[in-house]
Image (tube, grey):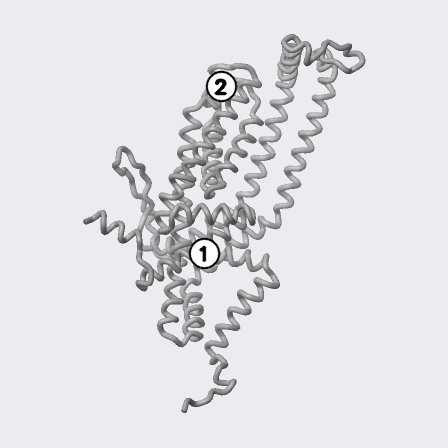
Amino acid sequence: MSEQRGFVDYLPGPGGFALWLYALVFIFAPLLLAYKGFAYIFGVVIFAIGLRPHVVKLAEGRGFNFGMRWRGEERHKTFKPGFASEKSVVRVLSILLVAFTMLVVPFLAYILQYQALVFYKQLNTQLPTIIAKLTLFFDAAHDKLPNIIPDVDTVEGTGWQGLSSLLNQVAGDAIADLKTGLKKMSSNIVALIGGLLGDWVKLVIGAIIVGTILGSWDKEVKMHRAIISGGIKDKQLRANVLRYGELYQDGVSLFLIGYLEVAVTLSLLYMVAMIILPLGLGIGAILFMGLVLGFSTAIPKIGGIFAMGISFLLMATNIDPGLGWFGWQVVSFGVVADVIIRTSLLMAVSKLMGLLEAYSYTPEIIGARLGMTKMQIIATIIIWAVGAGFFGMIWGIWISLSFQAALRLAQERGDIVDVNAVAADKDAA
């Protein structure tokens, strides 16, 4: 006869109780009662987890490969920083992260404020020319389409004839209104940056936390592995859980380096395009805009749309006449035409880069690194981006990587066939 088990026999032991309580205190309770705080700290920890393998590689003496493919051949150079130890790598990365997060928001605020002032000065200078172009357009429209735009007495304010004189009369008021509006826009930009101050502080604190985690990595890992090992008695289950965590870390690490590779590649392509096209940009503007557009476009699937919007704002607010290179004007078709040409060119480049990101670089670089298909990546990004916004898309990526880790674990255990490995064997045969 089988021995009957009492209620106490079904209770977890001290190790299992500690594991369940650990999950309750640090995961389930914060997820339900303090979601924003949980999402913030979880995102910071995930970033540190993904960054850790790169710290180890740098400490081992591995470097950065820079290169390109040309006619089927790879040409690259390797840069090795030569850190003395893992501790020195962590120190340098921590300083860089904190410095970047502390400076990025003030720098962007300065750029926005500066661009608003430049646009104000340019518009103040070019407004008479713009008004003259508009009057010519409306006068020509009246001449071509007299039935649609009839000749009506303008004194009564109901017709188009003599529109140029009306525009000239209100030009002074328009300039004054535009000045007021642009000054208000500048103050709104400052207010917007002030509203982001809280997020900026969180960003800086997050960078400090990342450095702290990396600095005490061995201690943190031993503690978590001890909690999991003590709470799971079955050896196979315990081994699978620990291995799953390692594979998830590898997935996050591969995604981070894959995104960086795509972003740097797109940034360089943007810079080359802005050098070739007659946009009249200086070296500093090309470098800044190339990095901003490249890292924006590299956001999987939806970055191309962001980049087109950024391109429109950057070029449409530059209303100086002339097409050329590095500040030298080569030809001009008028202020309005020049602005339209420059804006259209950069938006077309952004559209092309978005297509390269969506259908070439992201599937080939990130997808190949993670072992995920193009459809899996597209579905993940679109579902979460449409349903939960930009930050929801980031969460969607972390969640998809949990599937990727589970898939790799099943392939290692032989439960699922590794399709990529089978295809490689067939090619080799």
| Along the viewing direction, whichever of 210 and 12 lies nearer the viewer | 12
Give the residue at the far bottom of this rendering. Answer: 1
Question: Which residue in the structure is indicated by mark 1?
Answer: 48
x and y percentages locating residue 68 in the rendered image? 31, 37
Q: Which residue is mark 2?
A: 323
Q: Mark 1 is on which residue type?
A: Ala
Secondary structure, mark 2, is strand
Instruction: Answer above or below: position of 87 versus 290.
Output: below
Residue type at numbered disc 2: Leu
Q: Nearer the viewer, residue 210 or 309?
A: 309
Res. 229 image quadrant: bottom left
Using residue 237 as the reference point, say whether residue 23 is left or right of it.
right
Tell me where residue 126 appears, x and y as whole percent.
62, 18
Crowding at dot 2, Cα within 10 Å, few <14 / some 14-19 / many 20+, comes out as: many
Element at label 1: helix
Q: Quadrant of residue 158?
A: top right
Query: Relative to residue 32, is residue 365 depicted above or below?
Result: above
